[in-house]
Image: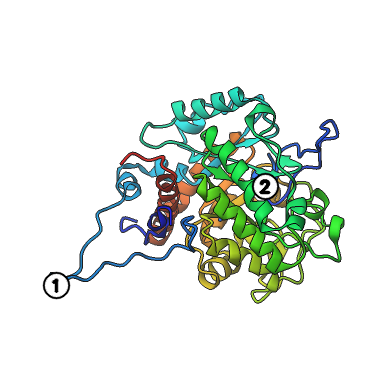
Amino acid sequence: MRRRQLLALAPFAALTACTAAPDPGDGEGSASDGGSASDRGSASDGGSDGPAREPSASPTTAGPTTEPPSAAERLLEKLDEREIAGQLVLVGHAFGTEVPAEVFTEHHAGGVFLLQRWESAEQVDRAVARARELSRPDLPPLLAVDQEGGQVRMLRGDAARRTPSAEELGEQGPEAVAEAYASIGEDLAARGIAVALAPVADVVDPALGDENEPVGALDRGFGTDPEAVGACVAAAVRALDEQGVAATLKHFPGLGRVEQNTDFSAEGIEDAETSPEDPFLGSFTAGIDAGAPLVMMSSAVYPRIEPDVPAMFSRAAVQGLLRDQLGFTGLVVTDDIGAAKAVADVPVAERATRLLEAGGDVVLTADPTLTGQLVDAILEWAARGEEEARRVRESAGRMLALKERQGLLEG
């Protein structure tokens, strides 16, 4: 219902999974860096009435009408190649640090996601203001944060209220989820943060329970039944949307069946069961139908979808399963590709280009020093040919459409 058409843009003509273990020094329990790539710290267009669809002109007696270009489309035509490439990188901002100015002034990063624990609203406001000041005035940054509730809450203290874990909320049902996520949305909107890197849509395998390190062990999942989890995910998506905050479904196609955390291990992160017909995908379908404008891809490997390839780099998982089969038209982002052990053996440049080849859009890096390398790699890949250039512009268009949907673009 809210600005549904913006993320359903046709290709432009010119054209993390895991989280750190709880901080023992925090009485509430915390993740040192968050739940996603973010977790170190997916687009339909986010309308609450279902996934985006291609707009069609209404016939009249005078013939078909032509929709005027959107603010996102107009802005895309004004950007140079590096500015376009930069939109496909989101950069981590750890508490107590400063994001290097060149991340925005030279590399034109699409935005920032907050990492670690921020206890002060004033500190968050300063970080948001600095990102905006360094960015081109008509190309503002997208601000995002892991704020799932329970242990995975980057904003604390007077920056955001405490909310229960997904496991607790799942036991209480969708109404409790909606109430908690309305609170999360209110807090993020008050700080100028447009994207929640939440909710977790992963269905935890009951045979694993807490042995499922990335989700079950940290109480990040709504439950073990796909239908019940889906109802909670949909409630979270709609509650965030009502507060003007975009939801991110993670970690597609699901981390509920793996044992190890992809932030800290490259072993034990294979899911041998999930397939394109798996019932565990139902929770993601529910979130897409509810209008989630982002989906975060998992770093795990799913042999029944594509052997030996992490989902974020798998065309079968991104284009084939998520986009073609489930009908998702929005922004597809990675979990952390900057510091996560799961991708440590992948050359930095390939971490961006392999996502684009798979049909995805934006990489998240917890290491801001990689920004220039990632943008350079996207530029070089786009220069290979017309198809590559079209893909980069298509993904940048999705990012700009999300920014327009969230009220960040002029006009």
Q: Residue furthest bottom?
A: 277
Q: How is the image coloured?
A: rainbow
Circles 1 and 2, Cβ within 8 Å, touching? The answer is no
Task: Give the answer, above or below, for where 288 lies relative to 136.
Answer: below
Mark identifier at residue 36: 2
Q: Is residue 223 visible?
A: yes
Q: Residue furthest left?
A: 62
Which residue is pictured at 83% across the width and 33% down the height?
27
Q: Which residue is mark 1?
A: 61
- Location of residue 66 by image quarter: bottom left
- Location of residue 277 by image quarter: bottom right
Task: Give the answer, above or below, for where 84 lies relative to 209.
Answer: above
Q: Earlier in the sequence, mark 1 or mark 2?
A: 2
Question: With 127 as the anchor, is 77 left or right in this view?
Answer: left
Q: Alpha-carbon neighbours of circle 2 within 10 Å: few (<14), some, or many (≥20)?
A: many
Residue 65 at x, y = what percent?
20, 64
Which residue is pictured at 51% across the width and 59% down the height?
291
Question: With 407 as the anchor, is 369 left or right in this view?
Answer: right
Q: Quadrant of the N terminus?
A: bottom left
Residue 18 at x, y = what percent?
73, 49
Residue 252 at x, y = what percent?
64, 60
Q: Alpha-carbon neighbours of circle 1 within 10 Å: few (<14), some, or many (≥20)?
A: few
Query: For the residues marked 1 and 2, what is the alpha-carbon distance in whole angstroms?
Result: 51 Å
